[in-house]
Amino acid sequence: MGRLDGRVAIVTGAGQGVGRGVARRYAREGAAVVVADINTETGTAVAAEITDELGARAIFVPTDILRQDQVEGMVQRAAAEFGALHVLVNNAYVAGGFGRFEHKPDGDLELAFRGGPLHTWWAMRAAFPHMKAQQWGRIINLVSLNGINAHKYSADYNAAKEAIRAITRTAAVEWGRHNILCNCIAPAAASPAYVAFATAAPDNAKEMLRSNPLGRMGDPEHDIGGVALFLASEDSDYVTGNPIFASGGTQVNGVQWDPPMPE
């Protein structure tokens, strides 16, 4: 018997990286999973992995998180397809590239907030009636050590991720009376974003690994998915409003990432 038997979960950005890892971990534990992603090829592939390889229930729902109608439609599709919604994982994000603070255009900040806290807000608000009606829900939002440690050259992304942390904490306080628990995960994972960073700044990537007490980047399914499983299961019945660092201890040393950046 799986720890999520009978549960229905949405995972956004589940076509790759951390989202894929969480979706697969949930499926292994018995959840029916909505794989929400803008990329039809990867989203369809992950849903097929879950059904064919893992023998679990899954559907792919194409979702552009910059569009409110699609975010709300994702939630309604989950409830219609599986009859309930128990777990919402807001993992997807859209943000601009690296740039020095003084050179960042306003559009980068606007994009980061629309691709981060705003779509998280939409999804949480759409999920609330379903979770309130059953007096049980788990909302897990992905935040970032970039924001917590103020990493360089991503001020827009950092601000957006910190806004998600504030939204999560506020919802935890307001929705606790409905047994809707809201928490964050700040991961350090071998995701496509990390691979791109390590390729651009290999020396800095090695320095960060040396500073990690566990000496490695997290595996999206085993390491990050394991924390997400805890927060989605009844094991976390008394845990809400928390940022959980799934980072191998990286947050303790706080070594900056420092990709090459022109003046």
Image (cartoon, helix red, strand yellow):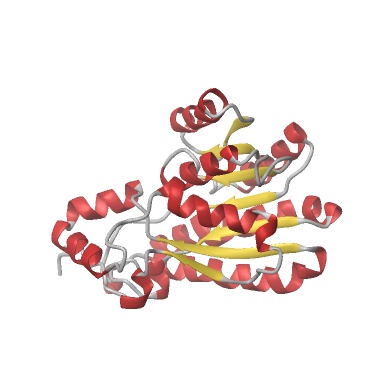
Give the left or right position of residue 252, taking residue 201 as reference: right
User: Which quadrant is the N terminus positioned in?
Assistant: top right
**Where residue 141 appears, x then y in whole percent?**
56, 59
Give the left or right position of residue 199, taking residue 111 as reference: left
The answer to whether any part of residue 27 appears in the image is yes
The residue located at (19%, 66%) in the rendering is 207
Give the left or right position of residue 173, taking residue 202 as reference: right
Q: Nearer the viewer, residue 8 or 76?
A: 8
**Where residue 126 appears, x then y in whole percent?**
72, 52
Q: Nearer the viewer, residue 67 or 175?
A: 175
Residue at the front extreme? 1
**Where residue 117 appears, x then y in whole percent?**
55, 62
The answer to whether any part of residue 64 appears in the image is no
Residue at the right extreme? 133
Q: Is residue 11 above or below residue 109?
A: above
Q: Is residue 73 above or below residue 200?
A: above
User: Which quadrant is the C terminus positioned in?
Assistant: bottom left
Q: Nearer the viewer, residue 86 or 193?
A: 86
Q: Is residue 114 above or below residue 155?
A: above
